[in-house]
Image: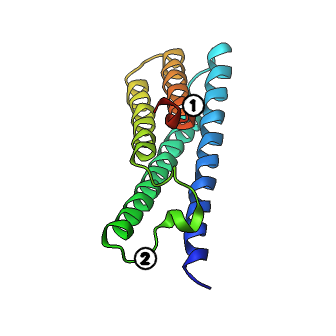
Amino acid sequence: MGDDFLYKGIINLYYNFEIVIFLFLFIIITNSLIKLSFNLTFSNFDLRLNLFSIILILLFCVLGFCIYLYNFVLNFFEIAPSLISYTGNYSVYSFSENFFNLLGFLIVLIGWSLHKIQLTSSRKFLRILIFNVLGILIFTFDWKLLS
């Protein structure tokens, strides 16, 4: 078993992590919409769900940045073939994808910090809803279309 198995496993972990994050953000968005429309109170479950999604997004950004740095070092020092030759995927290794993942994380984090200073439940859910929708749009948008 060579390095090919390891490289593809890390990339599969990255993409599976991305799916889990989209699922959590979708759950948070629907939860916020339901509780905002029925005027329900902000509970500990909502707090824990949002905090867990922020932790997952942070781990996802760190994993993507580690993949980018590892591939950069392999290419720079020409130690081994780059990960691109093993997987055929170019998006994980680009700086722009990691930058926009970090930007999406920062937008979700800004929504988290803005919701903490709100006093009413409806304003908390509105802040969470707006910033998580913006975050999921940034995570899912194909930025290669702009260039």
Closest to the observer, 99 or 30: 99
Image location (x, y in percent) of residue 88? 58, 60
Of the two numbered discs 1 and 2 on the same chain, state the one appearing first in sequence.
Answer: 1
Front-most of residues 81 and 55: 81
Q: Amino acid at mark 2?
A: Ala
Q: Secondary structure at mark 1?
A: loop
**Residue density around tag 1, few if under 14, some if 14–19, many if 20 or more, within 10 Å:** few
Q: Position of residue 130 (x, y in %)?
A: 51, 21
Q: Quadrant of the C terminus?
A: top left
Up the image or down, 81 lies above or below 114; here it is below
Number of numbered discs visible in the structure rendering: 2
Whether residue 55 is situated above or below residue 36 in the rendered picture: below
Q: Give the SS element for disc 2.
A: loop
Q: Residue furthest bottom?
A: 1
**Foreground residue, 5 or 41?**
5
Between the C-alphas of marks 1 and 2, the distance is 51 Å
Residue type at the position of mark 1? Ser
Q: Residue at x 59, y 64 (%)?
A: 87
Q: Label 2, on which residue?
A: 80
Residue at 49 percent across and 16 percent down: it is 123
In the image, which is nearer the foreground, mark 1 or mark 2? 2
- 66 w.r.t. 100: above or below: below
Q: Is residue 102 left or right of residue 91?
A: left
**From the image, which quarter does the N terminus lie in?**
bottom right
| Label placed on residue 43 | 1
